[in-house]
Image: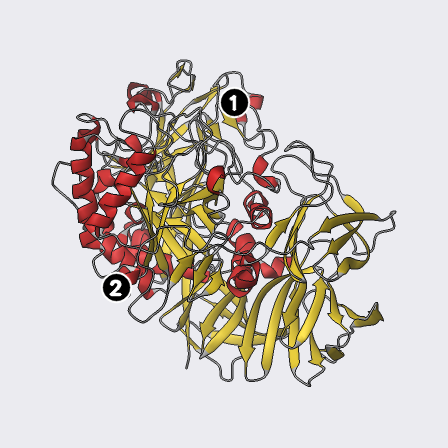
């Protein structure tokens, strides 16, 4: 597919000439928003502010109690390197007060240490205190001893006494860490998915929770509640946050989902569809009623989805990434992920998961909580990370400009979520500048190619048509293109490439773009702002022509060019191929922010670059701007041939290999039919007694494989076919997994494997008639009329680590 289309032209039009709405201030009654050094976090009717400037941050959920505390520092450094600004986390009550009045804030429950570590890694914190949090935990995280005694989620006096004590304990843990004290905690979320309107419930209960939080000392700049599923809350005391997921594993259908609304731009209500609330409210809810007073903030845009018993969708990376241009193009001014980082429920808590057996709507694994998120249950990078990280870098650089932009709908919009023919796009603009958002991806539903397309955007004082000639947009393509974007002292009228980030050095500015798949990058500069354009490499060629008072540059992905501005200053433009943009990080090293291209997972820790490679004992990474001297490394490093403008290095480490041998112990017995039941009247997980029918294997792994030197971790990669897999170290269950077709990855440093005990894998058979949804690509029932419980392989996959330091 090329940029120029042989087809008849289709002009996609949008009028963005109406002035952006002026923000209204003083509408929301939040807490203290100024830190001791004068830094301020603010909120108006349209966006957040930081030190008085518009702010559009990225927030990602990581549950400290679901990650070993020894790994927090590295995991938070990874989160920071992913371009995330705020880490959010539930405070799951049942983990902290398992018995009345006996609180545990130690080890992986050490909230204080987690928040302190977040600050050390340059992250702000948003603490979601509940007390009901959902989180796929039994009773939404409220301890059983509370639920057994009082009506929870209400203004019942005894319940409020327990909540008051819990909030007071949280406040003790966060003492000195709130924004007003110079700490990183900028926000508190109250409750979750609250839409109850019975006695002692409703808006008044949320107001009570806020009062209790303030009385405990939890005084922060922002107070939020979730706004979906007909949520109710006190107007102006809190601001609603929103979300959406690419599939609905809490649904009851055993078929593939229809086109999901998260892939269609929103021009009216901010409220998404079914987000899995456990309660029901027939009223309209409060979120839309306050849309003119509150900004469009997100907290639960799916970084993946959980695997539930009756529905087990498998996501592709674009299923998650394509949501970003849609939600941002719909006006979202805080992009919050749930989840950003997976994990596991704490060891020993074998009845704490949400389950139909304890009255929950869904069945979840007892331990495993991977979520198919950018970072998995072990902290490993999933492919989606490379897709979303460039978007985060874009928001860090240009979120301030985007935040003030209003949303403008096209002249023709799709008729519904299932309209796959009408182009999906929007413009956010403020005056004569803005961004064009486009999406041609809908999960599991192929969109048609849009052929012969040009966009016509009417701005405040001018109209712009882009690109210069019609293009074809392939199925599955999504992008954000800039309009009227200043680049240094050059004025970019538009580009058909996505802005990613900017570097500043003594030699001038470097602006980084990512090519859009199948579309040649075109940069149109206002002719009076740029007097010369030359390739950065004299051996390269560059297409340049003038049209309609614009200097139009046809760039080549992977190469760079230099634009000399009318005032003599120069800027460098690097256009990365799409695959290279997915390998890109922007990290501070050797005294300045640099671009790093590598297949390895990369982050900065205390001035050093940490590179981790799963399965491969060789590292290849490229750096821009080039280093003035060769850095040192924990392993021999060789400078190799340059990669465009990037300086390139290769490192090879000694390979490490161990065999994970599997020995059959018993074959599976005949499974009874899956029972339909629970409040969803759908497939429920088999009873505990049924697991005695599982097939079993012993895994033999050398003890030295558990803590091999030179490795940051290692994974048992289990490929099996069945219903439910469980892994035991002796009699202790250390992990479990609902089969979905993906390899089950168990980090040997993420679970407690006792080398003195046998390591046992069990697989409960999957019946051919099981009424559960599996992705057709991985469904073994197509070729079976009985049941299946098989292990294809268990392999040991090392995760190598290299540390690169300034010499």
**Would you identify the image quadrant in which residue 101 lies?**
top left
Mark 1 and mark 2: Cα distance apart in space:
49 Å
The percent coordinates of residue 146 (x first, y second) are 19, 31
In the figure, 704 relative to 92: above or below? below
The percent coordinates of residue 29 (x first, y second) are 35, 50
Relative depth, front residue between 757 and 586: 586
Residue located at (53% from left, 53% from top): 388
The percent coordinates of residue 553 (x first, y second) are 77, 69
Q: Can I make out residue 656 in this image? A: no
The percent coordinates of residue 494 (x first, y second) are 71, 63
Secondary element under disc 1, as helix, strand or loop, is: loop
In the figure, 404 relative to 274: above or below? below
Residue located at (69% from left, 78% from top): 562
Relative depth, front residue between 532 and 179: 179
Badges 1 and 2: C-beta atoms under 8 Å apart?
no
Q: Which residue was labeled with disc 2?
A: 181
For the rendered model, the colour scheme is secondary structure
Residue located at (50% from left, 46% from top): 292
**Label of residue 253 in the image:** 1
Badge 2: how crowded within 10 Å, few (<14), some, or many (20+)?
Answer: some
Query: Which label's residue is closer to the chain start, 1 or 2?
Result: 2
Badge 1: how crowded within 10 Å, few (<14), some, or many (20+)?
Answer: some
Secondary element under disc 2, as helix, strand or loop, is: helix
């Amino acid at each position: 597919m090329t940029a120029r289309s042989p087809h008849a032209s289709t002009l996609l039009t949008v009028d963005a000439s109406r002035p952006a709405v002026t923000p209204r201030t003083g509408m929301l009654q939040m807490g203290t928003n100024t830190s001791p050094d004068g830094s301020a976090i603010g909120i108006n009717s349209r966006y957040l502010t930081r030190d008085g400037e518009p702010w559009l941050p990225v927030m990602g959920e990581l549950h400290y109690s679901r990650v070993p505390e020894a790994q927090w520092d590295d995991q938070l450094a990874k989160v920071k390197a992913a371009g995330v600004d705020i880490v959010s986390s539930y405070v799951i009550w049942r983990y902290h007060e398992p018995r009345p009045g006996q609180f545990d804030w130690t080890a992986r429950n050490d909230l204080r240490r987690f928040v302190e570590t977040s600050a050390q890694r340059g992250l702000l914190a948003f603490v979601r205190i509940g007390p009901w949090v959902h989180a796929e935990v039994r009773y939404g995280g409220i301890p059983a001893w509370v639920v057994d005694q009082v009506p929870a989620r209400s203004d019942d006096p005894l319940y409020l006494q327990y909540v008051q004590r819990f909030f007071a304990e949280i406040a003790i843990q966060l003492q000195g860490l709130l924004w007003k004290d110079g700490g990183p905690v900028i926000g508190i979320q109250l409750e979750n998915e609250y839409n109850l309107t019975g006695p002692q419930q409703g808006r008044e209960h949320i107001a009570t929770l806020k009062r209790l939080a303030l009385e405990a000392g939890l005084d922060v700049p922002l107070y939020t509640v979730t706004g979906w599923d007909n949520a109710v809350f006190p107007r102006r005391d809190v601001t609603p946050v929103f979300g959406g997921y690419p599939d609905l594993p809490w649904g009851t259908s055993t078929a593939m989902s229809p086109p999901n609304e998260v892939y269609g731009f929103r021009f009216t209500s901010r409220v998404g569809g079914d987000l899995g609330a456990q309660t029901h409210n027939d009223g309209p809810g409060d979120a839309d009623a306050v849309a003119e007073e509150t900004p469009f903030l997100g907290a639960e845009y799916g970084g993946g989805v959980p695997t539930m018993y009756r529905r087990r969708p498998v996501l592709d990376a674009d299923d998650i990434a394509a949501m970003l241009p849609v939600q941002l193009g719909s006006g979202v001014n805080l992009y919050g992920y749930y989840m950003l980082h997976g994990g596991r429920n704490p060891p020993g808590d074998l009845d704490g998961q949400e389950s139909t057996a304890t009255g929950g709507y869904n069945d979840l694994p007892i331990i495993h909580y991977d979520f198919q998120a950018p970072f998995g249950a072990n902290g490993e990078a999933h492919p989606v990370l490379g897709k979303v990280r460039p978007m985060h870098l874009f928001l860090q650089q240009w979120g301030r400009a985007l935040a003030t932009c209003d949303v403008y709908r096209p002249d023709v919009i799709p008729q519904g979520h299932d309209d796959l023919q009408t182009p999906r796009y929007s413009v956010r603009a403020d005056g004569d500048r803005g961004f064009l958002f486009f999406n041609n991806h809908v999960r599991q539903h192929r969109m048609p190619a849009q052929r012969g397309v040009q966009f016509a955007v009417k701005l405040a004082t001018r109209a712009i048509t882009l690109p210069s000639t019609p293009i074809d947009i392939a199925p599955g393509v999504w992008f954000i293109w800039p309009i009227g974007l200043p680049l240094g002292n050059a004025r970019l009228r538009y580009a058909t490439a996505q802005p990613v980030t900017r570097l500043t050095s003594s030699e001038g500015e470097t602006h980084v773009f990512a090519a859009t798949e199948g579309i040649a990058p075109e940069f149109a500069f206002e002719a009076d702002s740029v007097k010369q354009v030359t390739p950065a490499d004299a051996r390269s060629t560059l297409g340049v022509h003038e049209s309609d008072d614009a200097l139009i540059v046809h760039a080549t992905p992977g190469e760079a060019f230099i634009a000399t501005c009318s005032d003599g200053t120069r800027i460098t433009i690097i256009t990365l191929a799409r695959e290279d943009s997915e390998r890109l990080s922007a990290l501070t090293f050797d005294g300045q922010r640099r671009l790093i291209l590598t297949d390895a997972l990369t982050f900065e820790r205390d001035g050093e670059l940490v590179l981790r490679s799963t399965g491969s004992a060789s590292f290849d990474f490229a750096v821009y701007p080039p280093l003035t001297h060769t850095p040192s490394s924990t392993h021999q490093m060789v400078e190799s041939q340059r990669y465009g403008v990037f300086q390139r290095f290769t490192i090879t480490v000694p390979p490490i290999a161990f065999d994970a041998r599997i020995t059959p112990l018993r074959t599976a017995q005949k499974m009874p039919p899956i029972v339909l039941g629970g409040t969803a009247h759908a497939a429920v997980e088999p009873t505990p007694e049924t697991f005695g029918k599982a097939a079993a294997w012993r895994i033999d792994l050398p003890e030295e494989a558990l803590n091999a030197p030179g490795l940051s971790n290692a994974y048992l990669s289990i490929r099996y076919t069945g219903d439910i897999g469980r892994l035991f170290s002796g009699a202790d269950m250390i992990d479990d997994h609902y089969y979905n077709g993906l390899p089950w990855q168990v980090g040997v440093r993420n679970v407690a494997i006792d080398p003195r005990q046998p390591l046992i894998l069990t697989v409960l058979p999957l019946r051919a008639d099981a009424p559960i949804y599996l992705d057709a690509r991985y469904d073994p029932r197509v070729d079976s009329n009985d049941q299946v419980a098989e292990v294809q392989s268990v392999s040991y996959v090392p995760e190598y680590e290299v540390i690169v330091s300034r010499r």
